[in-house]
Amino acid sequence: MDNILNQIGIENYIFLSVILFCIGVFGVLYRRNAIVVFMSIEIMLNAINLLFAAFSTYHQDAQGQIFVFFSMAVAAAEVAIGLAILVSIFRNMGTIDVGNLKNLKG
Amino acid sequence: MDTNLVLVLLLAPFLGFLFNVFLGKKAGKNVVGIVGTLSVAVSFVITLYLFANASQEPVVINLFDWISIQRFDISFGFLIDQLSILWLLFVTGIGSLIHLYSISYMHDDEKMHSFFAYLNLFIFFMIALVIGSNLLMMFIGWEGVGLCSYLLIGFWYKNQNFNDAAKKAFIMNRIGDLGFLIGIFIVGSLFNTLDFTSLRTTIESAKDVSDLWIAIAALALFIGATGKSAQLPLYTWLPDAMAGPTPVSALIHAATMVTAGIFMLTRLNFLFDMAPSVQNIIAIVGACTALVAATIALVQNDIKKVLAYSTVSQLGLMFLALGLGAYEVAVFHVITHAFFKACLFLGSGSVIHGLHGEQDMRKMGGLKKAMPITFITMLIASLAIAGIFPLAGFWSKDEILMTAFNHSNNKALWVVGSIASIMTAFYMFRLIYLTFFNSFRGTEEQKHHLHESPSLITVPLIILAILSFVGGAISLPGHSWLNDYLAPLFTKVAHEEHTLGSTEYMLMAIATIGALIGIGIAYKKYLKDNTIPSEDAEITGLSKVLYNKYYVDEIYDSVFVKPINLLSDLFREHVEKSLSALVFGLGKVTNEIAIQGKKAHNGSVGFYLFAFVIGVIVILTYLFLQQFFI
Amino acid sequence: MDVTTLLIILLLGAFATYFSGDKWAPKVALLFSLTAFAGAICLLSQYNLGNEISYSKLWIAKPKIYFALQADGLALAMVLLTTALTPIIIFSSFGNTYKNSKAFYALIVFMSFAMSGTFLASDGLLYYIFWELSLIPIYFIALIWGNGDAEERKKAVVKFFIYTLAGSLFMLIAFVYLFQKAGSFLISDLTALNLSSSEQFWIFMAFFLAYAIKIPLIPFHTWQAKVYQKAPTVGTMLLAGIMLKMGLYSVIRWQLPIAPLAAKEYMYVFIGLGIAGVIYGSIVALKQKDLKKLLAYSSMAHVGLIAAGAYTLTLDGLRGAVLQMIAHGFVVVGLFFVAEIIFRRYETRKIAEMGGIRAQSPKFTSMFMILVLASVALPSTFNFVGEFTVLYSLSQVNVWFAILGGTTIILGAYYMLKMFQHIMLGETNAKLFADVTFNEGLALVVVIAVLFFFGLYPKPIMELITPSLENILTQINRFN
Amino acid sequence: MIQIPDIANATPIQILFCVLSVITLATAFLTIYSKKPMHNAIYLVICFTSISGHYLLLNAQFLALVNLIVYIGAIMILMLFTIMLMNLNKENEVHKPRITRLGAIVVFCLMCLVLIAMFMNSKPIADGSYDVTGEDYQSIQVLGKLLLNEYMVPFEFASVLLLVAMIGAVLLSKKEKIEK
Amino acid sequence: MNTLIAITGLGILCLLFEILNFRKAIIPVTIIGLLAVLGLTYLGYNAPTSYYNNMIVVSKFSSVFTGLFTVLTVFLIALSHDFYEDHQTKISDFIAIKIFMLAGAVAMVSFGNLAMFFLGIEVLSISLYILAASNRLNVKSNEAGMKYFLMGSFASGIILFGICFIYGAMGSFDVAEITEWSRSAELPVWFPIGISLVTIGMFFKIAAVPFHFWAPDVYEGSPTLTTTTMSTLVKVVAIATLYKLLTAMNADLSDAYINIIIVISIASMTVGNIMALKQNNVKRMLAFSGISHAGFMLMTLLSISNSASSLVYYTTAYSLSGIAAFAVILYVCKNKDNEDISNFNGLGKNNPLMAAILAASLLSMAGIPIFAGFFAKLFLFNQVIEAGYLVVVIAAVINSIISVGYYFKLILAMYNKEPNEEAAKTPFVFYAVAVVAILLNIALGLFPSVVLDLLG
């Protein structure tokens, strides 16, 4: 079986992941809507997952893919908790604008 | 000699002091007076015994090592030799008399017991000063008498002016004391000993000791002496010290304590002989002091102030003699001066006592009849101080002037000394005339109470007057018992006996004539013309300057006291505050940063993440660049 | 008697005092402090018999830290000072009532413990620990039982604490650095080091910061006056009587032997600083309106002179410094007690509000006068012995130092007598002033007796400290 | 080194990669840029799908499926539920101040720049010589074995993680009975 | 390994107890269970091995820290009873989450595979998100949870990114293999980048500047017991993990890397201390204090080869004094709606024992002798000076001085101000925990060797 990286090159996967990751970071910084911020974080995690898969192929090793499962489990757990917190914030404050979280400062 | 004897000599007054301090109030005034006087009298008796049995060699008694310095030890010891015995004689002798006098004089004072306590303490310290075997022992007494002087000047402590005077005396003395200490340090480091006896031998055998350092040491010690003996420029405390009770003035500020400087210089004659330049300074300072004080005394109206300036002036003459190397002459004058000045002070005390505290001569007059004994004794003493033949003062003062005349070709010192003694004659008789002659100028009330003082007061007066009369006998020209007695003390062969040649007789004549002129002027002005010195406000011209003591106090005040106080204010108000602000400032700056920092923690997640990402970028960039460039 | 026993007595004393309750606390504290004094005397007698008084046990293996105590003559002298002053201080406070007195007296005894430890420790770290430990009790004593406005007091006390801590932390760095070189904190190892002169300079400066603040030397003194003023008198006595001496003792014990080259090279600077403190302190004291502040500045002037003496690096200087330390300890305790006695009757420390006390209280006046005289170093008081020796050593370095330092004789007399005059003399005060009580009198008499006894016969102390100082001098001169 | 895509000689796989990458990046960007939460979600779904495409490209079928199930099936649905639950599909978001947005862009550019620069600078990996072991390393079978043998402990531990998340979610949303 | 299983089992037992209606027994049983775990840990300490294909490596280091975590958790759980008085229905959840958090912590210090590390850190983080937001009706708690969650998951992303690059470079997650390969000469650049990213993620967890911004807000907003957890247990876990990570990766810390640590360490100390000066909220102040302590702890990384025992000592000292301090804070602020310093006014009169304990713990944190905090700093300074970084020590010392300023603010409030109200009754547990913690702290100060020798 041919290694796909011979055609595409690991660098391209890295660049793709890096840019995707950076877009995620950008989203976190750029948006105030908490849901979108969550989504941005998911994008970051996905970028990493993709890179894991690419490295897995690179090393011809399944561990990378195993790690992706864990990462997905973590992502799922995080989102669950994040949304639970979000809901209780929405209930208390009526907004999910991150910029409004300024009770604690100084 | 018996150590115990010396200890008794020393401690008897101290025991008297303790008794008066702790039991004095309960014991009653008479007991206080008797115990106080007896304790000094005991010392006097022992001194007499010592005097009678004195050997030629000095006796050193070392009790224990007191202070150790790396290179030498300073012992707690006593030195009994001719000089100390001589001094002890008149200190305890006159001291006893004055104690006696005080019993009556202070009888009305509620704090008589503390007065006697202080007096006893003074005698104790004075004895310690005199018999100390080394410079530091002497320093104990030196400072101790200063303390007693402080306590006694401020005896009537409810008057803050008196307290100021006391404080001034103490501080002025301390300025001198610093000089003394510096002198001790230099002597110590030069010769590795402070013991008088070993110092003397060391100095005699010393080689390659820097003349300069010896001179500095001598000068420093002399500064110490100027403080205690009220010489220029540290004399101003002595007139103020008259705030104390009159017996104190007699004992401390005329007869004994103020002569400590002369004692010290005489003790260390071997040192001063090695520093001729300093001797010159001493002579000049002495002469100047004699003149300046005499001029001030001319116009003073306070009976005690006149005597005080007279004391300063006489001390100046003694220093003149010291500066000329004529230690035995100075000592002679110290002794005669002790007699007549004590007598004068006690007499003035008697007068003041009679007038219930009045000290202004303008309010006296005509006391001759009311107080005959006082008048006669004071007259004798005045004649003595004026230098009238054959009283004690004539011999001693004449010797000083003679020494000054013979000393060098420069007769300036002699001229100055002579003028001072002419003035002495004038102001003393001004005092006598104003006080005892003409009619009484005080209130009717006072006049009514005028009376001769009780015998406890007059007896000491009489004794002292007799001594003033005959005291000159101890050192007559040509047959000086004193010079022989003191001879072992001096390194130089004592001044060759004055052969009484024509010069000497001429000088004696000049001095006597001068004194008579002074008396004459006083007679003319105050007895014939019956002039009364004008009120303070009306004094003008030169007299005003003199009356105000050349404004020296004011000058000192504005040159030293005020600037120090201003400096204190400056330090307290500004330097302290700014130093403090410097330290607090650091805290303030930190707090300010904290306040600014609080603004950065603005609660915005966006900003927090922004900082986070920037941090990541910076770290990665730094790592990347490091890797790239290495 | 073991050297540790002394410390244990004091530590136990602190706890016993705390648990004995408010009523008994002062007595228990006095009992234990007297016991400690007796213990110190025991140690002294053993030392005089020629026994080595030391205790050493490995405490922490890595880094190597010993629980090492050693009492040579110098340390013993200081421990005696501490244990002798503590009972006096405790006793002097009997006239006052303090709320929560069990804690108050426990802290005093604890502080005595820490200070004794500081003097005895021969391991650098142990020494540092005791040094810092002694800071905490005085902090609380000043803070809780102090007087005046709470806010201002807080400011002063916190400044004091932070300031002194700041200095000592640099000392800690120096110790750690030395440890790297020597492999242990033991003073015997530290003084055997061959450090380069630049190393010595920095170590010296680190120590200097700690000590200059503690002593305090100008210009590090700004904490002092306020704290003295605000602290309760007992605290002030502890501070001025003993704690300052910790700084001076440390200069002699640690700083000079460890970094002698720097001390020699910059000798003039440090002596100059000390003397500047003398003059500055005296001049500032002149116009103080608050009695305790005046005494604070006077104390600053005195310790300036002591420090100058220590920095001369001569036997005389060191000996004079130690003598003066002890003398000053007693006299300053006495003077602050006098301030307290006045405060008990007049409820003020403002000099302007006093005056005319003498007529009402002859005993008090005499004792106050004697203390004033001792403070201005009248010969035959202990202070004179110290001051004379120090000034002598200064004159050996440079006679100008002696002259400038000697101004303390004049200025000291000036401000002390002025103070005495304004407080005691003048027209009889309208307010009633009861003469000293028996307890007050007893405390003062003890102090005065000590001052006179050693003023006339300082030999026992001299003989006690001289051998240790000579040892220290050989260490100082080891680079020659 | 970046290989400049040679469009003419591109293999289908390369073209596929490029297309997928463009879709991934574009939808990712749109996810962030779009104003309406619902649109965000849909773009994100597309993005995730395209990533699954990448997985397929890498021949990681199981991963692709799991990705679809977990992300699109679970996570995104959860998010959509939340959006709808809160009725958030409105463009009422206040924009961050311009400076913040500018900062975000700058940071984005910088980060890309730094990371890309770093990786460009990394040692070139020999062209065309990627390891090919020929073994089967990513079939479900292999993954299963690996996961349940070597990675058993983390696998079990992940359950703890999920348990915590579950308890947490309950804890955060359960109403308490106020006890008297 | 047994420890980990036992802890997890204990957590599940908690949940079961709730179901079986043994609510009252939960806390005692857990504490007893945890003490048993401590025993197990001791067994592990004596027999270091690795389990399950190197997933879990029990070493002396991990055992010691596991022990420390367990002790801290015992304290935290003991405090729970009174803290969750009003939330009795949820108490099993709270306790279970804490136990699982401990499991995560143990996984973090005894990982042998990066997967365990990552899962451990996530278990810990997610538990904390929950705990931070657990006061669901309180806006501040919500906000704290949200902020922590957003930033925490961001940081998790960074860590994951780092792990990814490490994997890319090494082709393995096994620490032993990575260690072995990292010694070979030619490492792809991915490896250092990966390490840096993981480190940055951990910097976030220990709240080092400039990744510290979450800490004050989250500490302030969270329920006080959670703050206690964060400032004691979590901080210790994070720094221990970072230390283990860097030793395990055997990354020859390059000069550049060391420089970064120096800068971050100094910055953390300085920012933390300066910012703490002007805080009115005690929790916020201690958050900044925690930041500065993170800076101190980071100094251990400068001589990473031999500073393990210093680290253990420092963390133990710090966390014990933290527990003691927070026990008092919990008592004081129990029925207050904020944690302002003014609440402490006059505590010295109302409750001298508690005031003394708080004062002692603050003094320990400030590094005043006889408390363990001093020795911690001493050993640290000693090690760092030995490694040749005198500058850092001087910065640390200056910071210690600043820190006294705010620690004493609290002490001053207790002793120098009049009390606002009457003394409240102190629950026994608060007393017990505070006293035991501070006594342990002092004992540690008197016998530092006990802890120091654990790691030789």
Image: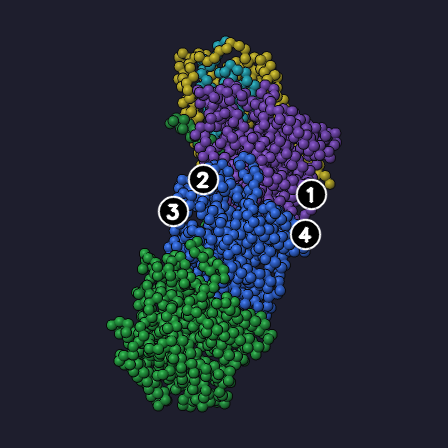
Chain colours: A cyan, B green, C blue, D yellow, E purple
Q: Looking at the image, is mark 2 or mark 3 earlier in the sequence?
A: 2
- Of residues A82 and B83, the one drawn nearer to the viewer in this rendering: B83
Q: In which quarter of the image is residue C274?
A: bottom left
* Location of mark 3 (residue): C265
* Location of mark 1 (residue): E427
Q: In the picture shown, does residue C478 fall above or below E55?
A: below
Q: In the picture shown, does residue B584 fall above or below B371?
A: above
Residue B315 in view in this figure = no
* Contact flag, marks 2 and 4 (Cβ < 8 Å): no
Q: Which of marks 1 and 3 is in front?
A: 3
Q: Looking at the image, is mark 2 or mark 4 earlier in the sequence?
A: 4
* Location of mark 2 (residue): C193
Q: Which of marks 4 and 1 is in front?
A: 4
Query: Label 1 lies in what chain?
Result: E
Looking at the picture, do discs 3 and 4 lie on one chain?
Answer: yes
Query: Label 4 lies in what chain?
Result: C
Q: What residue type is labelled 1?
A: Pro
Name the residue at 44% across, 46% down.
Answer: C474
Name the residue at 65% across, 34% down.
Answer: E74
Q: Where is residue B373 in the image (x, y as percent from the top left)?
A: 45, 87
Q: Looking at the image, is mark 3 or mark 4 earlier in the sequence?
A: 4
- Of residues B334 and B308, the one drawn nearer to the viewer in this rendering: B334
**Separation (CA) of disc 4 from disc 1:** 26 Å
Q: Where is residue C105 in the image (x, y as percent from the top left)?
A: 62, 53
Rendered image: mark on residue C192: none
